[in-house]
Amino acid sequence: MNGSLVERVHAALTELGLSQADALLESHLERAANQQQSYADFLLGLLGSEQEFRKGRALATRLRMANLPYAKTLSDFDLGFQPSIDARLVRELQTLRFVSDASNVILLGPPGVGKTHLAVGLSRCALEAGMSVYFVTAHDLICDLGKAARDGNLDRRMRLYEKPKVLVIDEVGYLPLDPVGATLLFQLVSARYERGSIVLTSNKSYTDWGQVFGETTLAAAILDRLLHHSTTLNIRGESYRLKERKKAGLLGDKRPAGPALAPAGAGKRHVTHGEDDNAPGA
Ligand code: ADP
Ligand code: MG
């Protein structure tokens, strides 16, 4: 292809906004000549590199918007370390069917067992599948909505948390909520009910949620909506942080028994009222 013709192709690619195809045009032309590619093969290669580039850029944008606390994935998670987690259940969650079903995932367990890591890993899967995710701690969420309510723009702010396909609410229960905070969380859970998934982590068993929310009626109402379509993973084991400190020789080797947050049977699906002592209001 002569110089001016290649320049005209560059100009057309620029005008069409195909920046990656524009940048890689020469290398694709060279490969086509060397490998005696068909016209269709050449075009597919050129457009394919543009598609890949755009997908990567869109993922980077979604990742930035998702506000994840760290960049870990599910494959970084050592399931062998935490036998109370049903690996099949994690694989099932990884299919993201729960997102299509607008179903929730509740990760319960003591500190350091990997609740946030799993929530981040699932978020990453959803982001890679092209879905929108937003990660927030319960504390930041309530502060933000509380401020919006005081400033008179609660509806607008609420929409930010209603919109993403997956909303992660991390660390519910670390700090008790005042009645306004509990009501705001109830409003949000109700707004997302059967519309969008919530992935929630908590160090408190469902029986302690009354205390967290200051009153049992509201806690029961929140749990009722949250658990209607949901999967609960009860992680009962040792803190991974502790293991790492032990490995570094900072602690003895005696394993502390992790607090049992639920009776036997980790990873129950569709927990419902009265099924066990994790049922709302039980
Ligand atoms: P939690 O939210 O339950 O308090 P995190 O998910 O923050 O705990 O985990 C604490 C740290 O240990 C994080 O750095 C996390 O990546 C790591 N971690 C926890 N469990 C595992 C695991 N099973 N495999 C690999 N890393 C883990
Ligand atoms: Mg955490």
Image: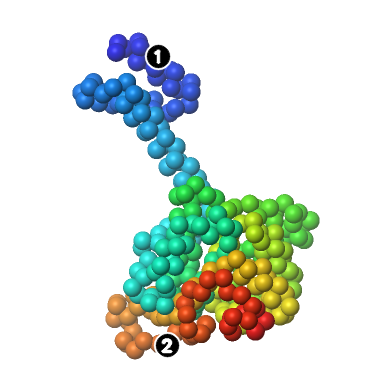
Residue 100 in sight from this viewpoint:
yes
Query: What is the quadrant of the N terminus in the image?
Result: top left
Residue sticking out furthest to the left: 34
Q: Is residue 176 left or right of residue 89?
A: right
Q: Residue at x 72, y 75 (%)?
A: 218
Q: Is residue 54 above or below residue 130?
A: above
Q: Which residue is mark 1?
A: 8
Cβ of mark 2 under 8 Å from ligand 1: the answer is: no
Q: Is residue 51 above or below residue 43?
A: below
Query: What is the quadrant of the C terminus in the image?
Result: bottom right
Q: Is residue 191 left or right of residue 48?
A: right
Task: Indicate the position of residue 27 as horizontal and vertical percent values.
Answer: 28, 26
Q: Earlier in the sequence, mark 2 or mark 1?
A: 1
Q: Which residue is mark 2?
A: 257
> SS of the residue at dot 1?
helix
Residue 208 in sight from this viewpoint:
no
Q: Is residue 180 left or right of residue 193?
A: right
